[in-house]
């Protein structure tokens, strides 16, 4: 599945969870870094308005579908992909790193949340080694000197997997920059994944997620912040559906 935005084409690959974990394991085995983005409908809105965000996304090695609308659009285009929520990948990615003898860095949120996330990860992944916990200050600029300082801290830590919880577009802009500076490191944007682990944010119940209603649950809990976001997403959906139908008529690449 692909999305054409201005002069960039963003392709979802690997196509599902199993393919993602296989590719990450291969990269750990060969000391090959990566930048992983988790595409959702909100990102597709922001990508059209933010050139820096789009440029950063285009420099990611791996993009997966983190949102049911993206999955549904892929089916409409007859290029089906699987749902791979970033929050669900935190423990599996950390487990792969541990099995490969690699250490992990946690970047984002707050120091208290990172401590809680580390405790949760250690319980889920026996033998996990955390090389660094970095909670950037409010107003963190991933493209400025603060971003450079975090890159140097990661370099000094020796970590080979960095779980990024900075929120879009900061985590993708930082990941693209750090990917170039730290070619052996894997950088994965996992949004609120660390806060869910730490318990500082509550995730939608499993049944709500299985019914593809997580967006409604989130909007009910944070209406003032999320209603404008979801309105913008809904406004873009018809155009995306038309693009998917157009792609449906073309032979697979």
Image (cartoon, grey):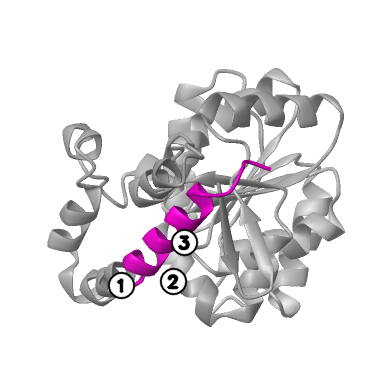
Mark 3 vs mark 2, CA separation in Å: 14 Å
Mark 3 or mark 1, whichever is nearer to me: 3
Dot 1 lies on which element?
helix
Mark 3 vs mark 1, CA separation in Å: 21 Å
On screen, 55 above or below 91? below
The x and y percentages for residue 39 are 50, 54
Residue corresponding to mark 3: 243
Dot 2 lies on which element?
helix
Mark 3 or mark 2, whichever is nearer to me: 3
Query: Picture quarter containing residue 100?
Result: top right
Mark 1, Cα crowd under 10 Å, few <14 / some 14-19 / many 20+, is some
> Residue 85 lies in magenta, yes or no?
no
Residue sitting at x 74%, y 45%: 34
The x and y percentages for residue 243 are 47, 61
Give the number of callouts: 3
The disc label shown at residue 78, or none: none
Residue corresponding to mark 1: 229
Dot 3 lies on which element?
helix
- Please tell me whether the stretch drawn in magenta is mainly helix, strand or loop: helix
The x and y percentages for residue 189 are 56, 52
The residues colored magenta run 235-253
Mark 3, Cα crowd under 10 Å, few <14 / some 14-19 / many 20+, is some
On screen, 27 above or below 238? above
Give the quadrant of the C terminus: top right
Residue corresponding to mark 2: 45
Residue sitting at x 57%, y 69%: 170
Q: Are marks 3 and 2 in contact (CB under 8 Å)?
A: no
The x and y percentages for residue 72 are 36, 45
Observer-nearest of 229 and 160 = 229
């Amino acid at each position: 599945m692909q999305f054409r935005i201005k002069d960039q084409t963003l392709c979802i690959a690997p196509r599902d969870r199993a393919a993602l974990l296989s590719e990450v394991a291969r990269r750990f085995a060969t000391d090959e870094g990566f930048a992983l983005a988790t595409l959702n409908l909100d990102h597709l809105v922001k990508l059209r308005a933010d050139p820096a965000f789009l440029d950063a996304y285009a420099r990611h090695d791996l993009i997966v579908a983190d949102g049911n609308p993206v999955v549904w659009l892929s089916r409409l285009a007859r290029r089906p992909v699987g749902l791979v929520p970033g929050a669900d990948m935190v423990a599996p990615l950390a487990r792969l790193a541990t099995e490969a003898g690699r250490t992990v860095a946690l970047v984002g949120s707050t120091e208290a949340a990172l401590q809680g996330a580390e405790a949760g990860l250690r319980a889920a992944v026996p033998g996990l080694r955390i090389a660094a916990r970095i909670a950037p200050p409010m107003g963190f600029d991933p493209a400025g000197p603060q971003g450079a300082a975090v890159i140097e801290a990661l370099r000094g830590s020796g970590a080979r997997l960095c779980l990024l919880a900075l929120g879009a577009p900061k985590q993708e802009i930082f990941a693209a920059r750090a990917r170039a500076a730290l070619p052996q490191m894997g950088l994965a944007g996992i949004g609120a994944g660390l806060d869910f682990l730490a318990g500082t944010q509550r995730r939608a119940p499993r049944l709500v997620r299985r019914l593809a209603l997580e967006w409604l649950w989130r909007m009910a809990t944070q209406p003032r912040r999320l209603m404008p976001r979801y309105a913008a997403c809904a406004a873009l959906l018809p155009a995306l559906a038309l693009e998917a139908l157009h792609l449906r008529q073309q032979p697979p690449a």
